[in-house]
């Protein structure tokens, strides 16, 4: 009886010792894991010394933030680069910029709805003011009664053409040509403006190329730069006199409200 109990206890002890022993080859695997962890720690320290943040190191190595902290906490806190400072500022102000952009869009949309449908008289008055702001005018030192309008904004060109139609100016009296810097994509710009005015590029006059000055820092560059379109009305002397008279009539009318 007593001998049987001792045998049972001995068997359980042997089984316990066997369970606690690593399986064949486990020692090699443990060495690999230790080496991998050592390499990971070394890489984390390299990244920290290179100025990387904890989050950036975690993202690159795929380890816990607590492990990164343990490995690199004795290293000095890295100074942020100019690029990082700019990014931090951008991240901080991005929500405010988004909120402002939304507010701006809402205000513009609300203002656009306030205009509603435009009457012919409203278009007439707007067109007079538009021409006197952007069109060519006769000067004392350079008398000229030509009706010529130059602009780079396609919306302004469309509004001006709508005004000319309201005045009864026939389409065959209109002449178009482009003014653009020689370094731009001239053919592409001509196609664009032809689409705006509903004409063929073959109907355009000779394009005026502006010489490029390398000393000048131009802002009107890139694929959205399309130069300026010139719209001239043939036989426009009488129309010019009327435009000038209409403008003075508007000025007098405005003064009467003061």
Image: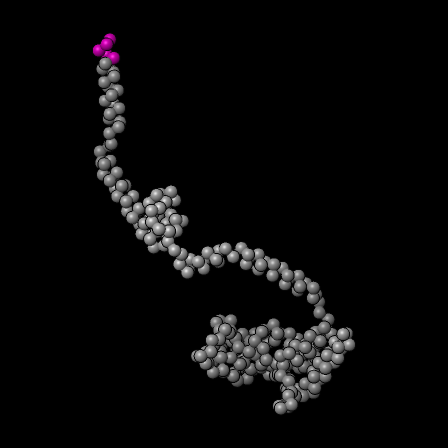
Q: Can residue 174 be seen in this view?
A: no
Q: Is residue 30 magenta?
A: no
Quadrant (top left, top right, bottom left, bottom right) of the N terminus = top left
- The x and y percentages for residue 184 are 47, 77
Q: Residue at x 54, y 80 (%)?
A: 178
How would you classify the magenta stretch by its main secondary structure?
helix
Identify the image quadrant of residue 199. Answer: bottom right
Residue 236 in the image: above or below residue 1: below
Identify which residue, 29 or 85, lies in the foreground: 85
Q: In this view, does 155 lie to the left or right of 82?
A: right
Q: In this view, does 227 lie above or below 44?
A: below
Q: What residue is rendered at 52% in x and 83% in y? A: 208
Q: What stretch is highlighted in magenta?
A: 1-5
Q: Which quadrant would the C terminus be assigned to in this image? A: bottom right
Q: Which colour scheme is used?
A: one colour
Q: In which quarter of the image is residue 129?
A: bottom right
Q: Quadrant of residue 103?
A: bottom right
Give the residue displayed 70% in from the left and 84% down from the top.
244
Q: Residue furthest top?
A: 1
Who is closer to the viewer here, 38 or 212? 38
Residue 35 visible to an observer of this rendering: yes
Counting labels gives 0
Q: Which of 255 and 130 is in front in this view?
A: 255
Residue at x-position 39% and y-position 51%: 53
The percent position of residue 205, horizontal first and vertical second, equals 55, 84
Residue 79 screen position, x and y as percent: 38, 55
Is residue 2 in the magenta section? yes
Please determine whether, in this image, residue 112 is positioned above or below residue 192: above
């Amino acid at each position: 009886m007593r001998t049987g109990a001792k045998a049972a206890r001995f068997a359980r002890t042997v089984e316990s010792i066997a369970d606690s022993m690593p399986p064949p080859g486990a020692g090699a695997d443990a060495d690999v894991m230790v080496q991998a962890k050592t390499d990971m720690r070394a890489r984390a320290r390299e990244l920290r010394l290179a100025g990387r943040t904890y989050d950036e190191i975690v993202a690159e190595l795929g380890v816990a933030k607590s492990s990164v902290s343990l490995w690199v906490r004795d290293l000095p806190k890295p100074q942020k680069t100019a690029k990082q400072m700019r990014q931090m500022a951008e991240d901080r102000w991005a929500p405010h910029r988004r909120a402002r952009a939304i507010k701006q869009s809402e205000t513009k949309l609300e203002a656009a709805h306030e205009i509603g449908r435009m009457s012919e008289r409203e278009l007439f008055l707007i067109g007079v003011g538009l021409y006197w702001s952007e069109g060519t005018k006769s000067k004392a030192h350079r008398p000229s009664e030509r009706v010529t309008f130059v602009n780079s904004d396609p919306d302004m060109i469309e509004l001006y053409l709508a005004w000319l139609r309201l005045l009864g100016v026939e389409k065959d009296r209109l002449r178009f040509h482009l003014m653009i810097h020689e370094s731009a994509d001239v053919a592409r710009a001509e196609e664009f403006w032809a689409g705006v005015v509903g004409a063929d590029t073959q109907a355009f006059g000779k394009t005026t190329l502006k010489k490029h000055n390398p000393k000048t820092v131009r802002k009107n560059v890139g694929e959205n730069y399309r130069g300026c379109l010139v719209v001239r009305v043939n036989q426009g002397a009488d129309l010019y006199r009327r435009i000038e008279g209409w403008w003075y009539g508007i000025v007098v009318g405005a003064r009467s409200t003061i």
